[in-house]
Amino acid sequence: MKQKEEPTQAAARRRLRLRAAGLALLLLLLLGLSLGWAYSPWRSEIDPTQLLPKLQRLGQWMGPWAMAALMTLALVLAVPLMLLTVLALAALGPTNGLLCTLAAGVAAAGLSHGIGHCLGHAALQVLAGPRLQQLSQALARRGLIAVILIRWLPIAPFAIVNMVAGASHIRLRDMMLGTLLACCRRPWLWPFSWSN
């Protein structure tokens, strides 16, 4: 009986290592995309006088729900939140742009967290050392506060933070509520909504 269990355990460990490698590869890809957005040469060639009318037409054509869905996908693919916020405000106006950004941010946090949980949580449980396990559990005990603080500190791109949180012990509820509260707390957003 013991001989039969050992190959099964070895196969399970291999599957976990493959999932962990998949998560690491995905995180590296997202980091590369983030760096590409931050340092690409075309960013300096964007002309706001030509872009703004196009964004406003796009916002009228798509509406806030479709725009929020598109922004959610973009956030999962590591497009910077600040860039998307500015684009949404330009396309939809201050109030709808703000609400669209909040909805997309919370939805993307949940989606990215789920991807991280599916790819990396079991691998983290088995492969991580005891110190990393303790850190992950400590973050989970302070889940909501930890997420709010992580959102306020620019430690990594939005999508990467979400996926790492999903692989850790942080609950989905804490991730989504913490993201919403942290985004609502950002003082740079409120003047846009009040100017309407």
Image (spheres, helix red, strand yellow):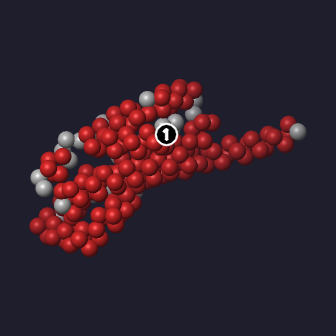
Nearest to the observer: residue 28 or residue 4: 4
Closer to us: 45 or 99: 99
Assign the N terminus to one quadrant of the image.
Answer: top right
Q: Residue at x 52, y 36 (%)?
A: 169
Which residue is found at the position 57% from the left and 26% from the top?
130
Measured from the top left, where is residue 128 in percent x and y?
A: 57, 33
Foreground residue among 79 and 66: 66
Decide: is 27 above or below 42. above
Q: Does residue 13 appear left or right of residue 44 in this picture?
A: right
The quarter of the picture where residue 7 lies is: top right
Residue 141, percent across and down?
48, 29
Kindly identify the residue that appears in the image at 56 percent across and 42 percent down.
121
Seen in the picture, residue 185 relative to 139 is either above or below; the reply is below
- Label 1 crowd (10 A; few <14 / some 14-19 / many >=20): many
Disc 1 on helix, strand or loop?
loop
* Residue 54 position (above or below residue 2): below
Is residue 23 found left or right of 29 in the rendered image? right
**Res 106 seen here:** yes
Q: Residue furthest right?
A: 1
Looking at the rendered structure, the number of numbered marks drawn on it comes to: 1
Toward the viewer: 86 or 98? 98
Rendered image quadrant of residue 67: bottom left
Give the residue number, with chain letter if any, for mark 1: 171
Left or right of 100, for residue 129: right
Residue 161 visible, this orientation: no
For the C terminus, the image quarter is: bottom left
The three-letter amino acid code for the residue at tag 1 is: Arg
Q: In the rendering, at what x and y percent does residue 90 appear?
A: 18, 61
- Residue found 46% across the figure and 42% down from its top: 173
Residue 44 position, x and y percent, is: 18, 59
